Amino acid sequence: MKKNKKIFIIILVIFVIILSVSVLGRNNIIIYSKRDGLYNNKFKITDDTINDVIILWDNKKVIYNNYKGLFLYYLNNNKNKKVDKQVNRVDVINKKYLLYEKNTNFYIYNMMTNKKKKISIPDYFEVSNDKTNLLFYNEGSFNIYNLNKNKIIISIKDVEDYKCINDSCTKLYYINTNRELKINSKNEKIIDKNIYTILNVNKKAIVYTSYEEDKYALKVKRNFSKSIILDTSKKIYDEAIINGNKIYYLVSGVCKESKLSGKNKRIITRNVDSFVNVYNDKIILVKGKDLYINNKKISELINTENIITSKNKIYYLKTKNDISSLYMNNGNKEKLIAKNVGMFIKHDNNIYYIGDYNVSQKYGNLYKVGSKKGIDKRVTSIVEKSIK
């Protein structure tokens, strides 16, 4: 009996170790390229030149397109499946569907059944947030094509601009050619007129601007309420971010804050170039080469092209004498992560970067922030395009 119990414990320990390694492996999948091919954690996927590489959101498959064709690569068994010959363009829509262009035609490929279907859509389209619909204009109409039903489910004529309310985009605000603001519904009504642009939308409110009598008006409409004017200006309103019951907006370099009700309006700071993101109920701003949270400067002389927030930390590069260094900032203190950094990305809520970067050779070593051990050497780039 004791012997059987001992064997059971040994088997249980082995199972837990295998499960832990499996989970750890899935959580640490990172796709990157070297001069001799495409890799995942030192394991070579292909040694061919890559045109398009996409990591699927489930971290189980990699899609790549080269001169030999379009392939699905399965990370669990390291096997390839050829989808088609070389194609012009690749887009992963969701876990189930792959969309690609070949010889000016578009095809939907079902990765569950391994079947493809030719569809008729224009070159330019967007994908709904829930990854179930394609959004595009065609012959003066705005159309929503459902992937599961394989047909257009909504078509609205006379749409100049739009913002989706829900993740599938089956409910949306739009501006028509008469500059009227509408919402698609059975009983479409004109919400407002003389609309200039829609700045932001969520499930509770829309923020937009109108233009009349030589001035712009910033307005907000909450569900089941009439529109109210938050602000007016002779300058264009550049940006607006809705955060809970508050809104941050930018006009002529001035960052302002207000409740959606129009109360407690105030100026946060001036001379702002752009917003980055909301951070702990405050706004991250860029002024020239300096980084601010509200009116507090937290860093200076940064590279403003790539600022990433992750786990309540802000990451960015600083370049001096052509050498870039990666920094982390918690809003109060700045910390140097690494010098000689070629690039960095956010992937699965982790920050990966190419350090020890050799500018002349254009490669370096791949690291994950928080881990002292490097992942691989002589890495030229990290694959950024990822569906989550």
Image: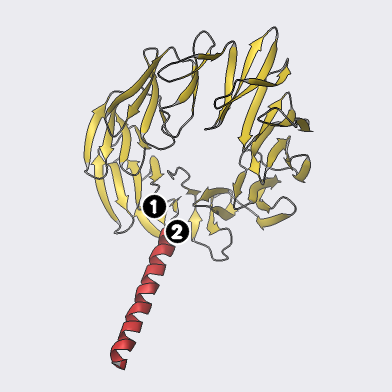
- Mark 1 / mark 2, whichever is N-terminal: 2
Q: Residues within 10 Å of mark 1 (few under 14, many from 20)?
A: many
Q: How far across and down, in percent of the image, does residue 215 sit? A: 70, 12
Question: Looking at numbered disc 1 in the image, what kind of residue is underneath it?
Answer: Asn
Q: How far across and down, in percent of the image, does residue 357 sit? A: 58, 53
Whether residue 351 sits left or right of residue 58 in the image: it is right
Residue 76 occupies which quadrant of the picture? bottom left
Q: How far across and down, in percent of the image, does residue 383 sit? A: 46, 47
Question: In this rendering, is residue 44 above or below 166?
Answer: below
At mark 2, the secondary structure is helix
**Residue where numbered disc 2 is placed:** 27
Q: How far across and down, in percent of the image, does residue 257 sit? A: 72, 32
Asked whether the residues under the numbered discs 1 and 2 touch, taking CB atoms below 8 Å apart as contact, a structural biologist would say yes
Give the alpha-carbon distance from disc 1 to disc 2, as whole Å.
Answer: 8 Å
**Residue where numbered disc 1 is placed:** 59
Taking depth in this image into account, of 341 and 17 the one nearest to the observer is 17
Residue at 42% across, 20% down: 185
Question: Looking at numbered disc 2 in the image, what kind of residue is underneath it?
Answer: Asn
Taking depth in this image into account, of 143 and 301 the one nearest to the observer is 143
Question: In this rendering, is residue 227 above or below 16?
Answer: above
